[in-house]
Amino acid sequence: MKRITKFLYIVLGFIFLGLGVVGIVLPIVPTTPLLLLASFFFVKGSEKFDRWFKGTSLYKKHLESFVKRREMTLKQKLTILLTADAMIAVPFIILDSIAVKLLLIAVVIYKYYYFITKIKTVAPEERAMHEQALVEETSHK
């Protein structure tokens, strides 16, 4: 059973990796959260695939600065927040339950609170400098 679970995690990792790659080309698909999901599933599924994924330029470009320094560009934050808002809006519009609508509003408020207070916003140039420093740091090891 454990092997099947690990296999499913790896498969899900590759699915979200593929969707994240699509997000690089199509601006409507959020790249960063999909790659974060891929990373999560690779960690759960296989140390080998986790190491491989973290060694890719895709990981280094889109996730490493977030994972190491809890920072994102404003564009990344807005893409994630607005995509999540669009997904939350669907049940908010469709459902009649006041309790569910209040819960969804609470989720949206917390989401914005978290992104504003817990994740640093950096300029793309500053992020590029950090990425360059990480590349130099890993090349010296």
Image (spheres, rainbow, N blue to C red):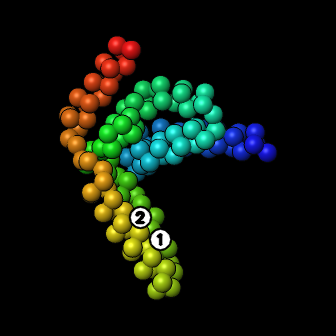
- Position of residue 134 relative to residue 69, above or below, is above
Q: Amino acid at mark 1?
A: Val
- Is 108 in front, or is 117? 117
Numbered tag placed on residue 137 in the rendering: none
Numbered tag placed on residue 90 in the rendering: 1
Q: Is residue 106 visible?
A: yes
- Count neighbours of disc 1 (C-alpha within 10 A) and say few if under 14, some if 14 to 19, many if 20 or more: few
**Measuring 47% from the left and 41% from the top, which residue is drawn there?**
35
Q: Amino acid at mark 2?
A: Ala
Question: In x, y percent, where is residue 136?
Answer: 31, 18
Question: In x, y percent, where is residue 97?
Answer: 50, 85
- Is 7 in front, or is 86? 7
- Do the CB atoms of the residues marked 2 and 1 lie less than 8 Å apart? yes
Q: Secondary structure at mark 2?
A: helix
Question: In x, y percent, where is residue 135?
Answer: 33, 21
Q: Secondary structure at mark 1?
A: helix
Residue farthest toward the top in the current orientation of the protein = 140
- Count neighbours of disc 2 (C-alpha within 10 A) and say few if under 14, some if 14 to 19, many if 20 or more: few
- Position of residue 104 relative to residue 53, above or below, is below
